[in-house]
Image (cartoon, rainbow, N blue to C red):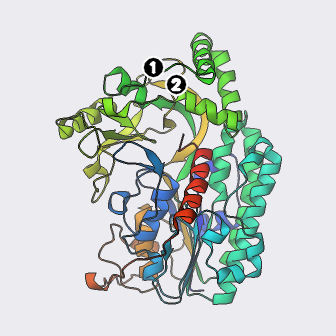
Amino acid sequence: MELLVIGLDGLSTNMLDRFGIEPEYISGVLDEGVSGDLVSVDTPTTLPAWTSFATGKDPGSHGLTNMIQQSPDYETTPLKTNTTDAAAYDLIDDAMFVNLPASVAREATAENTHLVSAMLAEDEHDAVPEHLQELDAFDGYLLDHDKALKKRPSVYFDHVCDITRARRDFAKEAFETYDPRFGFVLFSTPDWAGHLLSNFSDDETRGGYYRQLLDVVDECTADLAAMADNVVLMSDHGFERKHTNVHVNDYLRDEGYLREESADLSATQLAVQLAKSVGKRSDFLYERIRQVYNYIIATDVGQSLQEAAEPDIDYPASDAWQIRYGCLYVNDDRFDHPTVENPDALRRQLRDELAGLTDDEGRPLFRDVLLADEAYADPGEWAPDVIARPAQGCYPTMLASPTGGYASHTNNYNHRYRGLFAATGPLFADESSVEASIVDVLPTVMAALELPLSPEFDGEVIRDAFADDVTVAYRDASDVPEPRTRTASESDQAARDDAVEDRLEDLGYLE
């Protein structure tokens, strides 16, 4: 294989440093090859980021800006695969893509190219094309983890290690069988493990489990890397410990931008209200409540508590609200019941007000607050109106504040913008550093393969990554292939949607 890209979902060097982990192969590439931070997109989450990798476009252009989407009637639902933009599997002939998120329903248009989708698929049979299901390793291939095992961490981490090995085995057999010029495989498990670290009370326990998984990920990465002349390691975003939750919707409510539904409190909501009341009076009890919540959030009871702790927004009566990870929408004429007469003025007002929010010690809660046309190259109609990028260690939660104010203490692990990029092999520079965006990876890969780039790319070639100068050419706009899709029946699509909703609920993106 001429070039192999290995995705390490959610991995970043700060996490390796925090727990003192030095995975042999990954560390070797970071030290001896070309490496650096790979900046994610708005939002730094799986579906927007991997779609940006696949298309070379930022989320404003390809339309997947969050892990969920909101419709004109204010309902939030799982995202759908982008079906309008040419992707890597349309542009690169003789290729094999294994476990690429947000690609279900797409069919590769490039010659002799094969696509295995991920995350938005219903199950393994929905993700893997029929001809690849004939591989021996398909019998052990798992699309997703068993969330019920999270209540037994030692069993769960054995489980995700097994999933990692099975993915390696499937990719290896697929590469051996079809002998592609270019390969891609994604190991999702570092992201799954990162989300679970919040459930543990100390770094020794966290580090032990994280090291267990990373040893397996590193072993599997090295095995596949041995099949290629040149290797790129990349992540879609990083992870970090969050010390502060930022309660954006609480601020919007207090300032009169957001209204909540009035309804009788359920028993669960009463329990949340009591916990918040106790937490305000005692830092010790607040910390204990937080630890218990982090532990049970993976359970059905925890899911009920999360729903009860989130505001019940009266969208038709509100002027603005947050929809996950610092993304704000203004209630303009995109929605069925618009309330805002001058959306542009409100967008600028919200941007300036959020930029001034600080914690009790006067530290800014956001490092940047941007309008859509400041964050994206070409924002579409449904791009967020305001994007509030959290400061380091801060997380813009949907949960209501447990202690009052707009910042509260947490000890959570969640996404950060900076992931990693590393490359090794004759094509790439030795012992040098670069910094780039995830939208730059596909143009760089295609330049490495001496393929003409799409004129539609938002990303650019990472020229400093190469050992020698590269010549960059572009194909004519008329030569950009049209995406090809496969249509699911209504019942198949419903089953797929149900599976995806369950997956997103498990990660906390849907109530």
Which residue occupies the foreground of this view, 396 or 260? Answer: 260
| Secondary element type, mark 1 | loop
Amino acid type for the residue under numbered disc 1: Gly
- Locate residue 41, reporting x and y percent: 42, 55
Residue for point 68% across, 50% down: 193
Decide if residue 441 is in sight here: yes
Residue located beneath label 2 in the image? 408
Residue for point 65% across, 64% down: 123
Q: Quadrant of residue 370?
A: top left
Alpha-carbon neighbours of circle 1 within 10 Å: few (<14), some, or many (≥20)?
some
The image shows residue 362, relative to residue 120, as above or below, that is above
Q: Quadrant of residue 495?
A: bottom right
Residue located beneath label 1 in the image? 405
- Locate residue 359, reporting x and y percent: 44, 24
Which residue occupies the foreground of this view, 40 or 98? Answer: 98
- Locate residue 485, reporting x and y percent: 45, 75
The image shows residue 307, relative to residue 221, as above or below, that is above
Query: How many numbered badges does the structure rendering display?
Result: 2
Q: Is 200 on the left or on the right of 464, as rendered?
A: right
Q: Is 368 on the left or on the right of 139, as rendered?
A: left
Rounded to the nearest angstrom, the CA distance separating label 1 from label 2 is 7 Å
- Locate residue 221, reporting x and y percent: 68, 69
Alpha-carbon neighbours of circle 2 within 10 Å: few (<14), some, or many (≥20)?
some
Residue for point 55% across, 19% down: 265
Q: Is 360 on the left or on the right of 475, as rendered?
A: right
Q: Are marks 1 and 2 in contact (CB under 8 Å)?
A: yes
Residue for point 46% across, 60% down: 80
Amino acid type for the residue under numbered disc 2: Ser
